Image (spheres, rainbow, N blue to C red):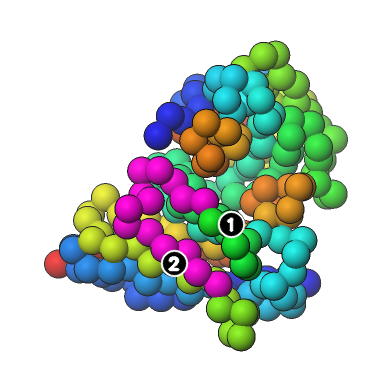
Amino acid sequence: QAGLTQPPSVSKGLGQTATLTCTGNSNNVGNQGAAWLQQHRGHPPKLLFYRDNIRPSGISETFSTSRSGNTASLTITGLQPEDEADYYCSAWDSSLSAWVFGGGTKLTVL
Amino acid sequence: QLQLQESGPGLVKPSETLSLTCNVSGGSISSSNYYWGWIRQPPGKGLEWIGSRYYVGSVYYNPSLKSRVTISVDTSKNHLSLSLRSVTAGDTAVYYCVKSIVAGAPFDQWGQGTLVAVSS
């Protein structure tokens, strides 16, 4: 199954801004947009955004998203220790009729 | 407040069938507003979608697992089930039950997950 591509790791300093990317194709990210999930160690993932930029209630506005073609991005401003987590993107693939995930990006806040 | 709770054996032998149940509480699995599914995560690795379904009708499976997996709904018990046949060590993972909103947020709610190890 074709998955989405995410960088394995990103490291940024406290208070800085991190931008995580997710690359798919015209059947998934480019068509349906991406969802983003955050997972802290030992916990289930939590949905941050869906359809590119729809934020469920309770998600901090320090998180934002964008998309250019087949690449979606998640930006986190003013990094805090609690932002250290694994971040996954996902999209519905219309050619596979399946949800696909990226391999995840481990964000380290220095 | 809707809650999801997975249950099932923590150890399954190779070539046997992995069977898990997700109990849905605080809401109806028969709601036309939701669809339900399973996602797994091997230890130290990323997320893999297994499949999703409405309480009746449409079912979608990961193409790589489709030949071995069945996801079913028991409306009388208000629970979701997962059956994965002919398991190997590669099926060792934390299995999550997830809820999504029809024409809305995917995977907006998760169970705590249950670890299933495949080993003789």
Say if B35 sits above or below A82 in the image. Answer: below
- In the picture as drawn, the residue positioned furthest to the front comes out as B57
What is the spatial separation of the Cα atoms under label 2 and label 1, in whole angstroms?
Answer: 16 Å
Going 71% across and 61% down the picture, which residue do you hit?
Answer: B34
Q: Earlier in the sequence, mark 2 or mark 1?
A: 1
Task: Report the front residue among A24 and B59.
Answer: B59
Task: Report the front residue among B113 and A78.
Answer: B113
Quarter of the image containing the C terminus of chain A?
top right
Give amino acid for label 1: Ser
Give amino acid for label 2: Leu
**Residue B58 marker:** 1
- Disc 1 on helix, strand or loop? loop
Magenta stretch contains residue A37: no
Task: Report the front residue among A4 and B31.
Answer: B31
Residue A85 visible to an observer of this rendering: yes
Task: Report the front residue among A36 and B70.
Answer: B70
Q: Is residue B15 left or right of residue B77?
A: left
